[in-house]
Amino acid sequence: MKQHDETMLLATPFHSRIAKACEINQWDEWKGYTTPNAYTEVEQEYFAIRNSTGVFDLTPMMKYRIQGPDAENFLNRLVTRDIRKIKLGRVGYAVWCDEAGQVMDDGTIFHLGDNDYRLCAYTRVMDWLMWSAMGFDVSIVDETAEVAALAVQGPTSCSVLRSMGLEGIHNLKPFGLTDYPFGSGQLMVSRTGFTGDLGYELWVEPQNAEDLWDKLFSAGENLGIRPIGGAALEMARIEAGFLQAGVDFVPSEEAVRPGRSRSPFELGLDWLVSFDKPIFTGRKALRKEKELGSRYKFVYLDVEGNKPAEHSFILKGGKEIGTVTSAAWCPTAKSNIAFAQVESKYGKIGELLIAEIYYQRELQWTRVLANCRVIEGPIFNPPRRRQTPAPMF
């Protein structure tokens, strides 16, 4: 039976190059696009991020262009942080909530011009953006398919971009933006990423995507450049302490059962809530939560042994007090790391807890009660991540 186009997964503008590089033919679906889970070996791709340069296709990330006289005011009403502090040519991390103060999603906001922004998000939020824009003089356009993007991450990433001819890129500060002429259009480079390492994200028109891929990999040929899939990126983001929507929290709009969504305070994102700015969606509920206390606390755990505590219960004194949302053995840090949500009275730095881990080998299930300790923050946070000028390797 012939398959109709509308039932098929979309291909990104880099697909011709990606398909050729994907030796093991291992694919995932991301927001309607076909993307590689791995190209060769996950471990090799992970170490490319940490030792040289890994390149990840970001194109399926949702991208919304927000423009108009009220663009700044609209975004300041939408998200919990003060958008006015994200200066022109800068990028800021933000979350937005519903009226109950529950997180709908997190993402990055690019300040591209006067009342001109791009919001990058994990979930499709056009309906919420349009509802929230009532009364504001703004235009909101879903430009996901109009912008191709690559994440270029790792210690040699700056050297690769300089080799590609991007003069002065080493002086770009973290969360900064800059533009270069490229092909028939422009190449925008942001010093951002999801790996916690030195890295950049490249944004280009789809018609120039293949040329960008070719030039990038030619420039990095002697610098250890390698394409990476979702599995390697997942290891890196856990090691760096980054949350993932749909994994570490349920976007409130998608939550079916009461009590399954979380507030910014319950995700350790209280630093993103600005009560000293004008009203924003969820402000009243978050102010009340700050006064009365939260239900849960987000914690980083250093887990005993080398069995990742995926989907584990967290115990204290034999009582179940929380669950693990993300977990991985982190090769660079040589640590078994987990993110967990626990009852708010637990989770003090240094507190000892128990992870109830189950794993299967040859159809045999094994139960392990592993000691774990609450740690202050991410275990991977190298100086090169923030260093300016960026170091050359």
Image: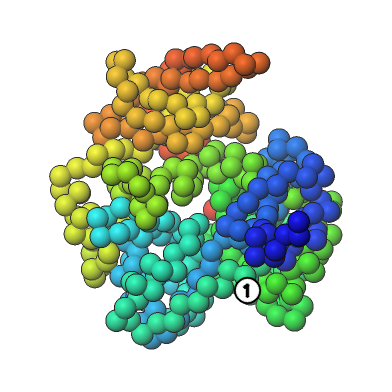
Residue at image point 46% right, 77% down? 140
**Vertical relation: 44 (above or below) 62:** above
Few, some or many residues within 10 Å of mark 1 (<14, 14–19, 20+): some
Which one is in front, 69 or 335?
69
The residue tagged 1 is 146
**Vertical relation: 73 (above or below) 1:** below
**Vertical relation: 379 (above or below) 391:** above
Percent from the top left, x then y, of residue 115?
Answer: 43, 81
Asked if residue 306 lies left or right of residue 276, the reply is right
Which one is in front, 63 or 217?
63
- Secondary-structure class at tag 1: helix
Give the total number of marks visible in the rendering: 1
Residue at image point 19% right, 59% down? 284
Residue at image point 59% right, 39% down? 235
Asked if residue 314 lies left or right of residue 197, the reply is left
Percent from the top left, x then y, of residue 230?
Answer: 64, 46
Which one is in front, 58 or 81?
58
Q: Tell me the kind of residue under disc 1.
A: Glu
**Vertical relation: 368 (above or below) 384:** above
Residue at image point 27% right, 64% down? 281
Q: Is residue 348 visible?
A: no
